[in-house]
Image: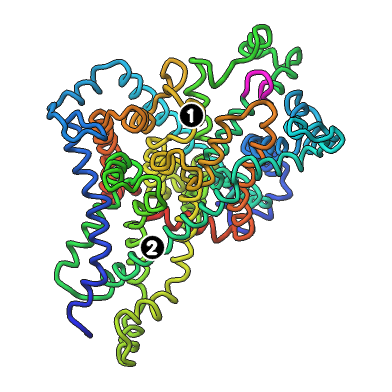
Amino acid sequence: MAGRSVHIWFVAPAITLMCLILLLPILVAAVLSFTDYSLGNTSAEWVGFENYEKVFTRTTYEKMFTATFTYVFVVVPASVGLGLAAALAINSLTRFGDIYKTIYFLPVMAALLAMAIVWEFALHPTVGIVNKTLVKGCGSWLEVWGWYAYQCANGFPLWLTDKNYAIWVVAFIGIWQGFGFNMVLYLAGLTGVPRELYQAAEMDGARSAWERFRLVTWPMLGPTTVFVVTISCIRSFQVFDTVEAFYPQGGGPGKSVFVMMFAIYEKAIQQNLMGIGAAITVIFMSFVMGLTMLQRWLVERRVHYS
Amino acid sequence: MTDTTLSAPARTERVTNFRFSATETLKHVCLILGAVIVLLPFYVMLSYSFKSPSEIMTNTGGFFGAQELFRDDYCIKLGNEVADCMVKPWIYNYTTAFSKAPLLRYLMNGVIVTASIFFIQVLVALPCAYALAKLRWRGRETVFSLVLFCLLIPVHAIALPLYIMLAKLGLTNTYAALIVPWTISVFGIFLMRQFFMTVPDDLIDAARMDGMSEFGIIWQVMLPTAIPALLAFAIFSVVAHWNDYFWPRIVITGTRELFTPPLGLREFKGDADGDNFGPMMATATVIVTPLIVAFMLAQRRFIEGITLTGMK
């Protein structure tokens, strides 16, 4: 081997950057979360657990957790479920499957901020295409649906500025953006399921498509599912673009869309309350890292053959 | 649900079967419905980027709008004749997008930032991956477990401490602020390491016999073999950073010269009034189009890239 220590030159830059950019900030966040630091101050007071106490007791942050978890618990199951359904449907088509695949993947490629602005416009209460289209349906058979009849009589929702709809609309856009990604992962997972297994299952009496799905496809997709769920969780925990685009101040009507990333941004960057921001960062990080660790543990335990 | 599952003869047999085509039709109906919802904002964006303000407000004119000439009030305010100020909506929208804000500058910033990030990532990750995969040295396992640990950390999550550190160094509102936090891609190291593990040792030994240095081996032997993995990583990296909004939003404040495309669009939205929806949608179209077109042209590669990088 030429030059015994040549590897040092190869790994040193990477290790240095890893320590400076990834590890040091964790330490900084952890330390700052116990202080009342703000940018521009020369010194900071040590405040102990005060920041964490605020985060876990004040109603603002209660709303933050509610918004974040509502978003995650809506977006993750829906985008994973839709991704799986789309993958199974597309995979079973005799033709045109690729067209759907392309279309469903488009939102993954498009800048979410740009699409958020377009959605905001499409959902505009008066001139938006959504309400304009919905109004056209009034007076038709669609009024059988109670909600629809009610809205026809009383005007359609304001969507993004309505406290009762805001978080759901933001979650819908999250699903819209993310399910194509999950679909593609599931399609890749499906190619790895051996055909013989289906024949074997059929011979063993798994007659219906549902039985074959339950006995073969779903267990074989186990590792894919673990991965898809984890990555969807991490991505939805990090939601920011849509929230900031719709509600540059305050996190939506009644703070109903005050998600964690936005809270960090608002408290720390806009209001220069670094201590609180750092405390939220630490909590946020433990969620995300915990999730990834759980995923690794599950993969190692080979959930897929359970 | 899973008719894929049928073997080839079974499938041909079923094609003639009415029940099969019924389920197939049902699937198409569902998938088309989904496609309509997925495409809706793209339709709105493209269509409104062609239409005049009044057509946007009244929701008329179909997809392209009637393209009737309309009066550009701003132009009249500048003291021009009314006759000179009549413009076609789509031309007005796109020229306004480029003239009202320095959109070209934003696009160039986007290119500079994404390209620099990718090149530095490769420059840092490739030698490290090579050392981890193909060289034997003490502490290798430790470094690899450090890499695995760092994979757990999402950079967006540590944005705040990074911002504070950059602010302390006086680096906010610079290209460096946009680029530096992304220069280390632990994921890139991991991906390349896995790829290099599959490269036969003989290839490297032969290169050493020829008197090639270890540096030479990385860039002249390993790099060419890693092109497919590198391409996948490039797609992953470029898509992520072209579309990123959170990080630029934090470190770039006010200085328009450094705006990336999403920031530029955001600012446009900030002062958009009724007349500016058309140009705003034109800006959005311009920003979204490059990646969409690239994706359409190299679909398989893109999907492979995104899934490969997804499947750790």
* Residue at figure coordinates x 67%, y 21% from the top left: A131
**Which of the two marks, 1 or 2, is nearer to us in this view?**
2
Q: Amino acid at mark 1?
A: Ala
On the image, the x and y values in percent for residue B140 come to: 19, 67
On the image, the x and y values in percent for residue A183 come to: 52, 46
Separation of residues labelled 1 and 2 (CA atoms): 35 Å
In this picture, which residue range is highlighted in magenta? A124-131
Q: Chain of mark 2?
A: B
The total of numbered circles placed on residues is: 2
Taking B303 as reference, is A46 left or right? Answer: left
* Residue at figure coordinates x 28%, y 71% from the top left: B133
**Residue position for label 2:** B120
Towards the viewer: B50 or B256 = B256
On the image, the x and y values in percent for residue B117 come to: 42, 58
Q: Amino acid at mark 2?
A: Ile
Give above or below for B122 relative to A21: below
How packed is label 2: few (under 14 Cα within 10 Å), some, or many (20 or more)? some
Towards the viewer: B39 or B71 = B71
Q: Are marks 1 and 2 in contact (CB under 8 Å)?
A: no
Magenta run includes residue A175: no
Q: Chain of mark 1?
A: A
Quadrant holding the C terminus of chain A: top left
Residue A208 visible in the displayed image:
no
Residue A242 visible in the displayed image:
yes
How packed is label 1: few (under 14 Cα within 10 Å), some, or many (20 or more)? many
* Dominant SS in magenta: loop
* Residue at figure coordinates x 40%, y 31% from the top left: A72
* Residue at figure coordinates x 56%, y 39% from the top left: B265
Q: Residue furthest bottom?
A: B210
Magenta run includes residue A129: yes
**Residue position for label 1:** A171
